[in-house]
Structures are given as C-alpha cells and as structure tokens.
C-alpha cells in the first residue's frame, strides 16, 4: 500500500451516532481504509488526530484549534511523525455566515489557497431552509480549482468525496488538503 497521503481521491466518512464522539474513516478510491480518527465528545476546543488505522497506534496528523471559541478560528496542522508544522486552516468568519470559506495557509502563515462553498444561492438555502442540501467546496490555489470536496446526503453518516485529481503539479500538500476535508466534515453543518 502506498503512503496514506499519496492518493488523488478519498472518501471521508463521519459516523455520528456514537456516545464516545464522532468517528472518521478515510478510504482511498479502492475503498481501503487508509486513516482513522475518533473525535472526543464534549470538547471545548477542537483537537482531531488522524491515525493509520482503527488501532490508533500510529498517529499521522494533528488538527488543533488555537482558541476555544472563535468565529474566525485558526487550526494548526502538524505531521506527528516528523513534528513538522505543515500549515493552517482559517475560517473566514463573517464571510462564512452566508457562504463557507476557508483560507489555506502555509507553515509561515502565508495564504496559499482557499476552500470555497460552491454556490451562494445553495449556501443560503442550506442555512435558512434546509440542512438537507449537500455541500460542495472547491479547493483553489493561484485562482485555479485543484480539488473538490462533495458531501453526500445521509442523515446518519456524513460522507465527503475528496478529489485532488486536478492538482497535477501537487501544488497543495496532500496532508494539508486531507486535514481540511476532515475538518470540514467535523465542523461544517453544525451552524445550519
């Protein structure tokens, strides 16, 4: 099996009917489990850890919020194996009230890309009428779409199809891109 971050397509599956908290299973395009996370319930500050499998013995990434409550929250992404600070994901606070938007920052906190909800009209409908309309996000660097995160509708299990096949030059570190997809799966939809 290749490196967990070497694929162009993933499926992030969040199972929410668990007393212990949300469980995330991350599969490659062949439906093989490549990563796992269990997010503890009732935490004031987001702290997501990705592991190589359900045994949770090999930690790969951490995604941690800098503050407890912050509308424009910043999340640090670190490679646990190397100790490297890969970058940050920052929610665009007021702008995200109507249409979700996130900044992708490198390790020195320079903006290198954005994650934007696809359609302003659908975004408004999601917020004010129905949370049943699945979200779609475009991942952009240098004004070009290099990936998409598409949510499937299921009231019990959140699934996000992650596709980086447009990122031919691998301009976005897959670790940061995959961390963003897990964070969106964990955070978005709560505000609806």
Image (tube, rainbow, N blue to C red):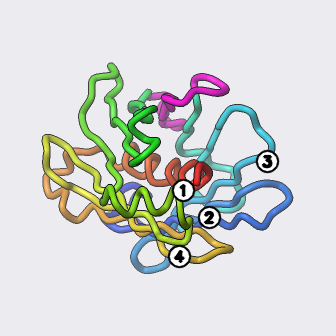
Q: Residue furthest front?
A: 129
Classed neighbour count for the residue bearing mark 3: other residues with Cα under 10 Å, few (<14), some (14–19), many (≥20): few
Q: Which residue lies furthest to the bottom in this view?
A: 30
Indicate whether residue 59 is drawn in magenta: no
Classed neighbour count for the residue bearing mark 4: other residues with Cα under 10 Å, few (<14), some (14–19), many (≥20): some
In the image, taking residue 48 as reference, residue 73 lies left or right, namely left
Secondary element at image label 2:
strand
Classed neighbour count for the residue bearing mark 2: other residues with Cα under 10 Å, few (<14), some (14–19), many (≥20): many
Q: Are marks 1 and 4 in contact (CB under 8 Å)?
A: no
Indicate whether residue 78 is drawn in magenta: yes
**Residue 162, position in %: x, y?**
38, 64
Q: Which of marks 4 and 3 is in front?
A: 4
* Residue where numbered disc 2 is placed: 14
Secondary element at image label 1:
helix
Q: Residue at x 50, y 70 (%)?
A: 27
Say if 108 sits above or below 80 in the image. above
Quadrant in the rendering for residue 112: top left
* Residue where numbered disc 1 is placed: 185
Question: Is the N terminus in the top left, top right, bottom left or bottom right quadrant?
Answer: bottom left
- Closer to the chain start, of discs 3 and 1, is 3
Per the model, the C-alpha gap separating discs 1 and 4 is: 12 Å
Q: Do the residues labelled 1 and 2 touch (CB within 8 Å)?
A: yes
Q: Residue 41 carries which label?
A: 3
Per the model, the C-alpha gap separating discs 4 and 3 is: 23 Å
Q: Residue furthest right?
A: 19
Secondary element at image label 4:
loop
- Which stretch appears magenta? 66-84
* Residue where numbered disc 4 is placed: 153
Secondary element at image label 3:
loop
- Closer to the chain start, of discs 4 and 2, is 2
Quadrant in the rendering for residue 102: top left
């Amino acid at each position: 099996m290749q490196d967990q971050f070497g694929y162009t397509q993933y499926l992030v599956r969040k199972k929410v009917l668990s007393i212990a908290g949300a469980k995330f299973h991350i599969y490659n395009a062949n439906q093989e489990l490549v990563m796992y996370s269990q997010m503890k319930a009732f935490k004031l500050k987001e702290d997501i850890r990705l592991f190589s499998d359900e045994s949770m013995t090999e930690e790969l990434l951490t995604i941690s919020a800098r503050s407890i409550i912050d509308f424009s929250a910043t999340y640090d992404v670190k490679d646990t194996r190397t100790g490297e600070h890969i970058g940050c994901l920052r929610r665009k606070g007021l702008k995200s009230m109507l249409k979700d938007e996130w900044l992708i920052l490198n390790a020195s906190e320079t903006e290198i890309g954005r994650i934007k909800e696809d359609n302003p009209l659908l975004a408004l409908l999601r917020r004010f009428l129905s949370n049943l309309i699945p979200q779609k996000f475009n991942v952009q660097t240098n004004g070009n779409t290099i990936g998409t995160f598409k949510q499937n509708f299921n009231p019990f299990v959140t699934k996000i199809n992650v596709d980086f096949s447009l990122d031919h030059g691998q301009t976005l570190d897959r670790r940061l891109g995959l961390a963003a997809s897990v964070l969106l799966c964990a955070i978005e939809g709560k505000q609806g």
